[in-house]
Amino acid sequence: METIIIVVFVLGYLAITLEHSIKVDKLVPALVMMAISWALISLGIDSFPNWFDSAKHALVDNFPGLAHEAKMELMEETLLHHLGKTAEILVFLLGAMTIVEIIDYFDGFSTIKNFIKTKKKSKILWIFCFLAFILSAIIDNLTATIVLISILQKIVKDRDVRIWYAGLIIIAANAGGAFSPIGDVTTTMLWIANKVSTGHLFGYLLVPSLVCMLVPTFIASFLPAFKGYLAEEDQGEINKPKSRFSAVMLYLGLAAIIFVPIFKVATHLPPYVGMMLSLGIVAIFAEYFSSSKFSLTEPHGGESDAHAKHSPVHKSLSKIELPSILFFLGILMAVAALESLGVLFGFASSLQDNIPMLGTELHHAGVSDLVVILLGIGSAVIDNVPLVAASLGMFSVPMDNELWHFIAYAAGTGGSMLVIGSAAGVVAMGMEKIDFFWYFKKISWLALIGFLAGTLVFFFTRTLF
């Protein structure tokens, strides 16, 4: 049964990558493989030799010896746990995307657009990559990608050019998220689990992460896609009237997003709670500025219908990319199925057992540098969250050991090598309809070079501590 579930996952994954060839939206195979995987787990629960407890990051002791009812109860608890964790990400994503759409409703991004005077493609590339690197460390790589691609859509009208920028934004955002405790979900996991501290994370990973961003950006600036200048806007676009609240809503929206990690640190609540608070505050100002009546009563009445046509919140919610949200749900819950069976834990463990000790600094930890590099590459194929979760249960080295920092770097930046290897990539794929194979041919090699360059720099920075 375990083999069948793996086959279902591989076929579903293949269907996602061949989306444009088979003419089926990627959310369909993602949802189907998620549902079938969990159905097969439920039907074959008594045949599995292992079960991975995600809450404790460890395999369940004597799982085959448990009664059928106990196994079913454990499966339901695990499913609920993964649904809860996935829902946290989806609700956070909905909040962030809605704030971005509200800013766009008031034409707030035209303010940033006015700051960027240059039309030279290579200069715009450097501006966006540095913004992605810095913003992802502050507000996390997922939100930074949403914000920057939204701005990009206002500046670069040609989609064929824009997806090149989006690809480099993914690399830069993932690199920026790796050295910040709130920049990437995997780094946050290690931080919350007391495996890394903020000071050492900056010390170990700031320079490697910066190199991971700089090298691909430098190479890309010489590619034909970034040669020359952007086309001039048509006169109608230039003369289009701007909202008098555009600058206010831009600064308010960005401040609300930046407030989320501050709220998380202060309250120790999950980020989505802070995002909902931020969305509520932004929505209050948006409703006030739009001079619309706010009504939650009589959803089918005349006043509500009129409000739905003019309310910036309703309008923004209607523009959310729901297919991207559902795709995210399907892919994360499908990976959760493999994680629950202990497949990913076994993969990470087999790497540790079978790869020869090629590292120098990590011999005492019982793991080689090559193992962690392969974990990073593996995070591009399989979601990096379960791989990091598996590593938490595998390794028992103390806090701030270089191993944990190397895992943070590898898992955070390795996902850039495939467009569905990171949350930032998945969101960009949804927002810009990026083809899997286009990204693989055009961007993956840049991400690999950046990943390896940053790895070499890490080998140097770890000797300083």
Image: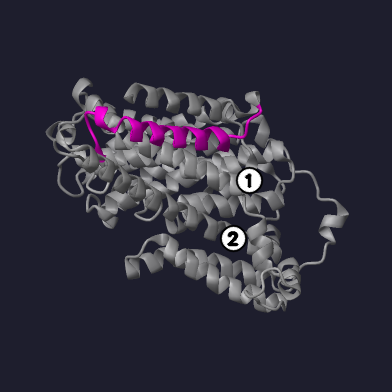
Residue density around tag 2, few if under 14, some if 14–19, many if 20 or more, within 10 Å: many
The residue shown at (63%, 60%) is 317
Residue 151: horizontal and vertical position, in percent? 64, 54
Q: Secondary structure at mark 1?
A: helix
Residue density around tag 1, few if under 14, some if 14–19, many if 20 or more, within 10 Å: some
Residue 246: horizontal and vertical position, in percent? 69, 69
Q: Is residue 224 left or right of residue 90?
A: right
Give the vertical position of 286 relative to 424 (above or below): below
Give the vertical position of 191 relative to 257 (above or below): above
Scheme of image coloration: one colour
Please give the residue where the numbered disc 1 appears in the rendered image.
123
Say which label, 1 or 2, has the lower sequence index: 2
Task: Tell me how many marks there are.
Answer: 2
In the image, 60 versus 383, the foreground residue is 60
Q: Secondary structure at mark 2?
A: helix
Q: Main secondary structure of the magenta part?
A: helix
The residue shown at (54%, 56%) is 94
User: Can residue 246 be seen from the camera position used here?
Assistant: yes
Quarter where residue 369 is shown: top left
Residue 447: horizontal and vertical position, in percent? 48, 33
Quarter where residue 347 is shown: top left
Please give the residue where the numbered disc 2 appears in the rendered image.
98
In the image, 189 versus 145, the foreground residue is 189
Q: Is residue 173 left or right of residue 242?
A: left
Q: Say what amino acid the circle numbered 2 marks.
A: Thr
Give the vertical position of 328 relative to 111 (above or below): above
* Highlighted magenta segment, given as a residue range: 23-52
Q: Say what amino acid the circle numbered 1 marks.
A: Lys
The residue shown at (37%, 45%) is 207
Q: Is residue 417 left or right of residue 195?
A: right
In the image, 454 versus 38, the foreground residue is 38
Q: Nearer the viewer, mark 1 or mark 2?
A: 2
